[in-house]
Image (cartoon, rainbow, N blue to C red):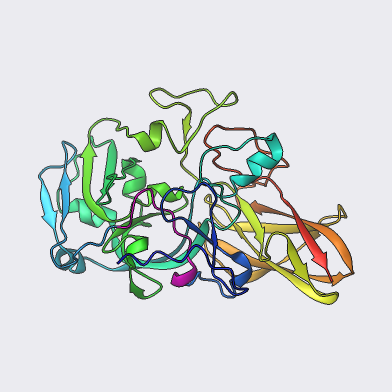
Amino acid sequence: MPDTPDLDKSTPDASFLSVPNGERANAETRLSQLTGYLTPIHAFYVRNHSPTPIIDAGTWRLRLEGDGLAREVSLGLADLAALPRITRIRAIECAGNARTFFERDYGRQAGNAQWQRGAIGVAEWTGVRLADVLARAGVREDAVDVLPEGLDADRFSRPLPIEKALADDTLIALSMNGEPLPADHGAPARLVVSGWLGAASVKWLGRIKVARRRLYTHWNTQDYTLAGPDYPAQAPADGVPVTVMPVMSFIDLDWPGRMPAGATRLHGRAFSGEGRVAHVEVSIDDGPWQAADLGDINQPAAWVCWSLAWQATVGAHEIRVRATDEQGNCQPESVPWNDHGVLYNAILAHPVEIA
């Protein structure tokens, strides 16, 4: 049976929160339960468009085809095991993370699954470079796009430009945090595309097409796009296809948060698809921005943990956090409406009640 987490957990230490209006088995990480740098597998958010397929690793094959390759190739897990192994610590974040806040800002829901802040996780991924796999089939010099396709019922697929596909940290992952991939996270093999939206990291890989032209699917033309009055359509898409994820920050508290009064430390995480986070600042009750302390681990295209000392007083408070990455990208005060509700990264006023 699929190992989809129980979405109805309500105990104080539950790892997941259910997602209103979500398709199939969607569950977001409860950030207040995270303690270390990596997201444990049991708490890593789940976003599936169709039921989780259970695939026999012994008979699984990955087909490489298309006019951008010199030849067609079929590979099994033993063939992948013969290639050089690499390990990368990277975040995967759904483009719709924090989508529910569009309704707060604009009075109507955008998209479908109403994620709060937990559609993101950081794991240690081990596998092989996609470039090394494609080399087995001979990538032509005039190749343009690479289209990975999943073995789920919808055959989920979303193209990558050849440059991103051949990047040193774009990999076919076979394990997660040192353990074999679970079914919900793409077993037996999935892509991990650094810094890009989670939809690019296609699960349950079964086929990869390489073409000498641009490729289009539903998921880069009618979904996972910035579509709306502020985003001119890039035909044949209904808007601007999403690629790199923006800078974002979170507090490791429930929404709303509850804490006891007295000397304490606020904790949270900040992420940018563009690289490392350079600064995190915190404002309490519209007070001055204070520089937070950053953790020792600050991986590119992953998050950094931050903390700030606070003398918490009894009553209701609002805490704002903003992050800036090494490219100078900073979280905005607001995000323009888009129909699919993607890339919400505005500074959030996090309500916190001090008992």
275 sits to left or right of 145: right
- In the image, which residues are magenta? 41-52
x, y percentage for residue 316?
85, 61
Task: Residue at 52% x, 36% y: name it.
Answer: 340
Which quarter of the figure is the N terminus placed in? bottom left
Tally of numbered discs? 0
Q: Main secondary structure of the magenta part?
A: loop
In reply to whether residue 49 is colored magenta, the answer given is yes
x, y percentage for residue 281?
75, 57
257 sits to left or right of 229: right
Q: 24 or 339: which is nearer to us?
A: 24
Q: 121 or 65: which is nearer to us?
A: 121
* Residue 185 picture quarter: bottom left
Q: Is residue 300 visible?
A: no
x, y percentage for residue 103?
65, 40
Q: Is residue 215 visible?
A: yes
Task: Residue at 47% x, 51% y: name it.
Answer: 195
In reply to whether residue 40 is colored magenta, the answer given is no
x, y percentage for residue 287?
88, 55
Image: 165 above or below 28 = above
Task: Residue at 36% x, 67% y: name it.
Answer: 3
Task: Residue at 46% x, 55% y: name it.
Answer: 26
Image: 165 above or below 340 = below
Which quarter of the figure is the C terminus placed in? bottom right
